[in-house]
Image (tube, helix red, strand yellow):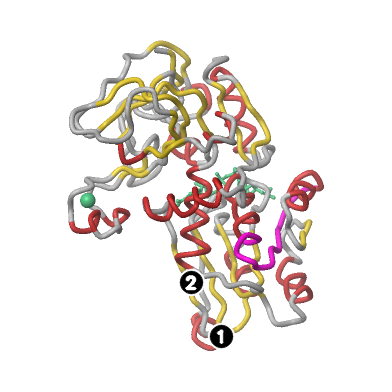
Amino acid sequence: MKAVYFEAHGGLDVLRYGDVPDPSPAAGEVVIRVEAAGLNHNDIWARQGLPRIAIPLPHISGSDAAGVVVEVGPGVVYPRVGDEVVAYPIQSCRTCSRCLSGEELFCRDMQVWGFQTGPLIGSFAQYARVQAAQCLPKPAHLTWSEAAVTSSAMLTVWRMLVTRTQTKPGEHVLIFGASGGTGTAAIQLTKALGAVAIAVASSERKAELCEALGADHVIRSDLHDVAREARRITQRKGVDVVFDHVGATTWQIGIDALSWGGRLVICGATEGFDAKVDLRHLWNKQLSLLGSHAGTHREWVQAMRLVNERALRPALTEVIGLQDLPDAQHRMATRRTLGKIAVDMVGR
Ligand SMILES: NC(=O)c1ccc[n+]([C@@H]2O[C@H](COP(=O)([O-])OP(=O)(O)OC[C@H]3O[C@@H](n4cnc5c(N)ncnc54)[C@H](OP(=O)(O)O)[C@@H]3O)[C@@H](O)[C@H]2O)c1
Ligand SMILES: [Zn+2]
């Protein structure tokens, strides 16, 4: 089958488009004919390599897929051959006490599919091998490309805004990197929860997308005035929730923007991991600083319910061919993409 893969970590030049062996399913697994795959910033980290995270080589990235089941391994009840499915990216043993109590993120075998898995496992290929439990029916009203970019983003923001910060109707949510894949999903979920979305975007084009997605306020900013603007919007109270995945450059601004008793949730650090906390602010303002990573199967099902009810819809802005992947990763790494990007595997 055709795939985009790499055999060593590095720049865009390590990405190869070519033939790799077809996958076949082990017990509890299925093989999907990938109709469309979704891009995530994580694909870039996998290609570059990260300290203390093992990424098996050769590696096929891609943690989101939509397609048709073509082969089923022993012991699989759902899905069946011919089913149209979307996949979410969490693999775990599905048998330990953590998994059985719905806490598979704390399973010792938990891995993000298409990121930590391999060799040669991910969605940037004509066929992909997944655990059966990674599949749900494809929402009928979405195109293949829309379906393919839904799971990771919606799952991540669901855990951040519902499970971790427990965002309430009427609360103010400050969303950094709001025009990106995770950020656009955060705007939509904030609105679906009845809260007020304050989006931060670094260009006019990005600000327009945030507005189109329903952001109540857009701070069009290079960051220095974000905390002041957030206090102005909230009549000096500060925001109840900060949604962050940018890291080093936004961390302190987010803390400054929080109200007393506010919660900050973070799932990534695109701009770097180095962050300081003034402990006096932490206790005086009684802040909650929360980490969040991916999401559970239950959280994915809950998010997909809102997708099926049309309260959430992925912000698909581009559909590319498999061979265009290096260019798209380059634009994503240099902050020139918007929303979600899908690879149309049928056109290849
Ligand atoms: N732990 C998890 O479960 C999880 C899940 C999803 C994503 N993540 C992490 O969260 C981050 C965002 O992922 P994503 O898929 O939403 O990425 P994305 O689609 O590329 O969006 C990233 C956004 O961040 C902003 N940004 C600020 N500094 C940036 C920089 N130096 N390079 C690129 N963008 C920058 C950009 O908006 P502006 O230009 O407006 O600032 C951009 O829209 C990544 O680090 C990713 O690995 C973690
Ligand atoms: Zn387990």
- Quadrant for the C terminus in the image: top right
- Residue sitting at x 23%, y 55%: 100
Q: Is residue 4 left or right of residue 231?
A: left
The span from disc 2 to disc 1 (Cα, nearest Å) is: 12 Å
Which stretch is magenta? Answer: 190-203
- Residue sitting at x 55%, y 55%: 245
Number of numbered discs visible in the structure rendering: 2
Dot label at residue 323: none
Rendering coords of residue 223 (x, y %): 71, 60
Which quarter of the picture shows residue 285? bottom right
The answer to whether residue 196 is seen in the rendering is yes
**Viewer-nearest residue: 344 or 237:** 344
Rendering coords of residue 329 (x, y %): 57, 31
Q: Is residue 231 left or right of residue 84?
A: right
Which quarter of the picture shows residue 9? top left
Per the image, label 2 sits on a secondary structure element best described as strand
Q: Is residue 333 left or right of residue 31?
A: right
- For disc 1, the marked residue is 285
Q: Is residue 15 above or below residue 133?
A: above
Dot label at residue 289: 2
**Viewer-nearest residue: 7 or 83:** 83
Per the image, label 1 sits on a secondary structure element best described as loop
Rendering coords of residue 129 (x, y %): 33, 27
Label 1 amino acid?
A: Lys
- Quadrant for the N terminus in the image: top left
Q: Is residue 201 magenta?
A: yes
The answer to whether residue 257 is seen in the rendering is no
